[in-house]
Image: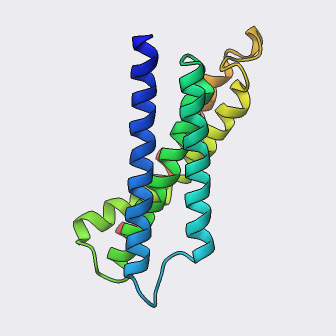
Amino acid sequence: MARASRSVSIAAVLFGSSVVALAAGTWIDFALAGHPAQSGYAVATQWISALVCGVLGVRVVARVTSNAVGWILVALSVLTAWTFLTDLVGYAGLVHHRVVRGVAVPSDVLAEASWLPVFAALGFLLLLFPTGRVPGPRWRRWPPVMGLLFSGAWFGATVQHLARRAGQ
């Protein structure tokens, strides 16, 4: 039982970091009065998707700690919120010069390819739903292959963005 409560606490803290990142990103967006980076619809979409994934993830972790689906949902919440924040920090710094360049450039680089881990998590969610395990023995090779492919794609997109930024 102690392991379950510790797991729920970890999931809740991760979900809490999502809420903090969403609030910070929303504040940055509203601080760019007259020149917001995101429309009100886009901000609401980020909040809804991160909150729904986070709440569902914490609930699944609370019920079945070993089920990977709950952890993937929590990860989706964290990825959505931190992608939103890094995108806005990069925009506020590089376009409006309201964030120190040493913070804005790494945020921009992280935000550029941050959609790839979200797609990877969605792929893992589809593969492991509902039990948290692959459907059978012949599927066991796919999680490592997916991890390798998405890691390579993320690395390639990040390097490409860095190369493009160096050319500016």
- Rendered image quadrant of residue 120: top right
Q: Nearer the viewer, residue 1 or 100?
A: 1
Q: Does 122 sit left or right of 39 as displayed?
A: right
Q: Quadrant of the C terminus?
A: bottom left
Q: What residue appears at the point 39 percent right and 21 percent down from the top-left corner?
A: 6
Q: What residue appears at the point 65 percent right and 20 percent down from the top-left corner?
A: 132
- Rendered image quadrant of residue 13: top left
Residue 165: x and y in percent read: 39, 68
Q: Does 149 sit left or right of 136 as displayed?
A: left
Residue 87: x and y in percent read: 44, 65
Q: Nearer the viewer, residue 49 or 97?
A: 49
Note whether 140 is above or below 84 in the view shown: above
Q: What residue appears at the point 57 percent right and 60 percent down from the top-left corner?
A: 46
Note whether 53 is above or below 131 in the view shown: below
Q: Nearer the viewer, residue 148 or 163?
A: 148
Residue 76 visible within the image: yes
Residue 54: x and y in percent read: 54, 42
Note whether 129 is above or below 114 in the view shown: above
Q: Residue furthest bottom?
A: 34
